[in-house]
Image (tube, rainbow, N blue to C red):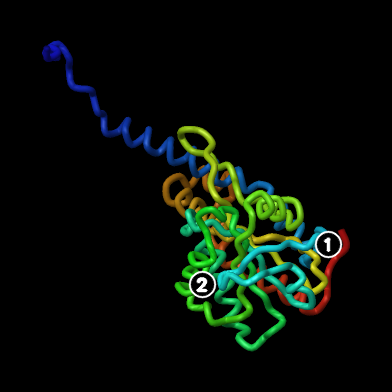
């Protein structure tokens, strides 16, 4: 039997209140975006005092896998080379875009430098086989560049090596109106010719998102933008790219700091 709704009245959809509610949600998201980058800001200030990269640890444990051509790969192949590493997850291809484009730009910037290597290890080997990994390289236009290795290995081994040896987190928690949610984290890390993993690591997605948040805050709530120094972050992606190439030059010069 149909319900009798004759006693119900339309909800009062006050446009002013709706705008305030929408703005409040937006501000929560924007402030959250700024706040979660507090460590990022502090770290950048530390970089300004001494911008040289430093050693995290050395890859003494050999990692084994299969590359995009289904050939055996080991980290021994990186000895004597300068490697840029990123974790891979083809289910999260949009999240990988920024890092892969940065790697591609670097490869194109130094097309004849055989010391360079570009390494990705998938954290989702059940989905990302050699054929799928090769397809990504083809879409990037670097499939014929022998300096690239996109690697599949047993899942636990791959995830453990990335987390505990290369020291990279490939999952992160972010704020949302419904509470924290998990997503794939795409990071770039340098590994030098002696297999030293170096800091800083580069999260270009984070730099881009902080930049977007800052611009939106400046547009929607100038007072909050001033409070959170949003104007300092409107060019964060460009600054991150400049820092990336600056670190590369330090590594080429062998100019590392201790610790």
Whole-percent x, y for residue 2 in the image: 12, 14
Residue at 55% x, 48% y is 226
Whole-percent x, y for residue 94 in the image: 46, 58
In the depicted structure, whether residue 25 falls above or below residue 123:
above
Whether residue 118 is visible, yes or no, is yes
Quarter of the figure with the N terminus: top left
Dot 2, how many residues are within 10 Å of its Cα: few (below 14), some (14-19), or many (20+)? some
Mark closest to the chain's N terminus, 2 or 1: 1
Q: Which mark is residue 60?
A: 1
Whole-percent x, y for residue 232 in the image: 59, 57
Q: Which mark is residue 137?
A: 2
In the depicted structure, whether residue 44 falls above or below residue 145:
above
Q: CA distance from mark 2 to mark 1?
A: 28 Å
- In this image, 150 relative to 49: left or right? left
Whole-percent x, y for residue 57 in the image: 82, 59
Residue at 72% x, 70% y is 247
- In this image, 103 relative to 22: left or right? right
Dot 1, how many residues are within 10 Å of its Cα: few (below 14), some (14-19), or many (20+)? few
In what element is the residue under mark 1?
loop
In the depicted structure, whether residue 113 falls above or below residue 137:
below
Q: Quadrant of residue 59?
A: bottom right
């Amino acid at each position: 039997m149909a319900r009798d709704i004759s006693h119900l009245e339309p909800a009062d959809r006050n446009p002013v209140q709706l705008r305030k509610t929408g703005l409040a949600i937006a501000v929560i998201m924007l402030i959250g975006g700024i706040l979660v980058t507090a460590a990022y800001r502090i770290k950048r200030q530390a970089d300004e005092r001494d911008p040289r990269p430093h050693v995290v640890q050395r890859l003494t444990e050999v990692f084994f896998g299969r590359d995009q051509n289904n050939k055996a790969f080991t980290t021994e192949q990186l000895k004597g080379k300068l490697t840029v590493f990123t974790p891979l997850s083809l289910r999260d291809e949009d999240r990988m875009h920024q890092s892969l484009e940065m790697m591609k730009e670097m490869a194109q910037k130094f097309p004849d430098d055989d010391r360079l290597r570009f390494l990705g290890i998938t954290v989702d080997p059940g989905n990302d086989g050699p054929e799928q990994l090769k397809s990504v390289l083809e879409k990037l236009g670097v499939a014929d560049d022998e300096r690239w290795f996109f690697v599949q290995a047993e899942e636990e081994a791959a995830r453990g090596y990335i987390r505990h040896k290369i020291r990279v987190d490939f999952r992160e928690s972010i704020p949302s109106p419904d509470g924290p949610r998990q997503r794939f984290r795409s990071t770039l890390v340098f590994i030098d010719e002696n297999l030293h993993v170096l800091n800083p690591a580069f999260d270009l997605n984070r730099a881009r998102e902080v930049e977007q948040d800052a611009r939106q805050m400046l547009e929607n709530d100038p007072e909050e933008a001033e409070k959170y120094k949003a104007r300092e972050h409107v060019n964060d992606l460009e600054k991150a790219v400049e820092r990336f190439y600056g670190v590369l030059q330090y590594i080429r010069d062998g100019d590392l700091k201790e610790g």
